[in-house]
Structures are given as C-alpha cells and as structure tokens.
Image: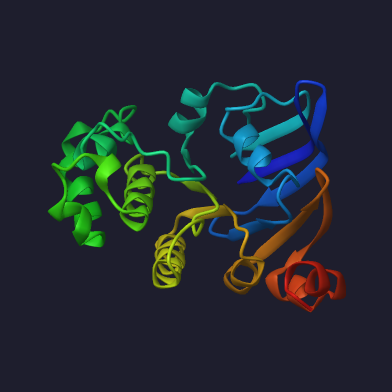
Amino acid sequence: MLEIDGLDCCYGKVNALRAVSLTVNQGELVTLIGANGAGKTTTLKAISGLLPPVGGSIHFEGEDITQASAKRILALGIAHCPEGRRVFPYMTVQENLEMGCYLRTDRSALTEDMERIFTRFPVLAERRSQMAGTLSGGEQQMLAIGRALMSRPKLVLFDEPSLGLAPNLVERTFDIIMEIRAQGTTVLMVEQNAYAALEMCDRSYLLESGQVALQGTGQDLLDDPHVREAYLGG
C-alpha cells in the first residue's frame, strides 16, 4: 500500500532523514520507534505532504505522492492524526469533526459517519457543542482520532497518540487504534512507548539519527539486545 524508498528530508541545512526506506502493507499496523529527534515525526510529515522530501520517493497504492500536496494526499485516503492532538480550540467538537471530512463529496453519508464517531466516543456526543479547547487532554485525543476517521481513510498516520495522557487513557487509546485496524484501516504509528508499540504491531522500524537502524516484526525487535537495552530499559 505505502512504499518509501531512499527518503531524504531536511529542515534548512539539517538533514533529518537519510535514505529511509519502509513499506506498509494493506491491513497492517506498522510502528516507528526511536529516540526524540530520530526522524519519526518527520517521516509522517513527508508522507502527508507537510514536508516536501529532497530525495527519494513515496508511493501510495502505486501512485507517486512524493511531491503531492497535502490536500491531494488526504483525498487519496491518508489521514494524519498529529502529535499533541492539534484540535481547533475555538471551534466546537462537531465543527472539528466536520473539518475532517471537508474533501468528501458523499454528503449523504456524513451524518451516519458523525453518529458512528459519537457512538464510539460517547463523551464527544455529550460535548458536541462545546469548544474543543476546553476539553481534557484525553477528550481532545478522542476528537483528533475521530476527526481523522471522518475522512474515511485507507491509511491513518498516528503521531505519539499516548503523549501526555493518563495511564488509563493510554490503554484506551491503544485499544481504539487496534479496533480501527481490526475494522480494516491500515495504520502507521509513531510511538514513544516502545514496549507498547512493539507488542501491538505487525512490523516495526527503529529510526536512529534519521536512518532505519533495525526492522522486523514487533517480537523481533522486542527480542533484540540493542532495542532492549536502549529503549526497553534492559
């Protein structure tokens, strides 16, 4: 479904990604792990069109999207749930969800999808007229996930979905991501909690200094001595 080959990305003169190659097959849950600054978020930004690569290529379902606009990439079926939620604070919960489907033309199905989101996240239904900026961190994360799903994506990019959440909400968030995958949506997730990410994924890539250092199944990386020592506390 997604193929990245030799990807290079820069912030000014700083080379953030160097020859990164990875694949995500349809129906998989693939994770990117690594330290802060390793290039994980940069990879997601490049895929979603927020950071144009300076080298390499990105293909989605056979189409070259390396230099495609973020609007085009969303229209093709890639949704990005960014780090830190990034809800629109002065818009209501319902208006935030509507922003997630502004490119859709099947208007008749939007009400049904909206109600499906409210069924999945009852707290959002209770607060549908509330300003998003007044929600708790966990509620904003549910809203960000719901907004991404409103585009009916084929692939969802999750960037640090557990960041800043209470432990009980972290578990709930991971459960939701697993449900999304079980219902047929492909997932590529960046997650600082390496142990949780490796336990729930099909395959994983370890990024270090902007390069792929290791790749394999979640269990492969859980069993790797370097991963255990550097990212799992031994």
- The figure's colour scheme reads rainbow
Question: Residue drawn 27% across and 49% down?
Answer: 135
Using the image, determine if residue 172 lies above or below residue 121. below
Q: Quadrant of residue 86?
A: top left
Please state the horizontal and vertical placement of residue 38, each as a whole percent of the image. 76, 47
Please state the horizontal and vertical placement of residue 180, each as a whole percent of the image. 41, 60
Q: Is residue 178 left or right of residue 231?
A: left
Residue nearer the viewer, 10 or 134: 134
Quadrant where the C terminus is found in the figure: bottom right
Using the image, determine if residue 164 lies above or below residue 201. above
Question: Residue drawn 65% across and 69% down?
Answer: 198
Is any atom of residue 206 visible in this view? yes
Q: Is residue 84 left or right of residue 131?
A: right
Q: Is residue 53 left or right of residue 96?
A: right
Q: Quadrant of residue 229?
A: bottom right
Using the image, determine if residue 31 lies above or below residue 84. below
Is any atom of residue 62 visible in this view? no
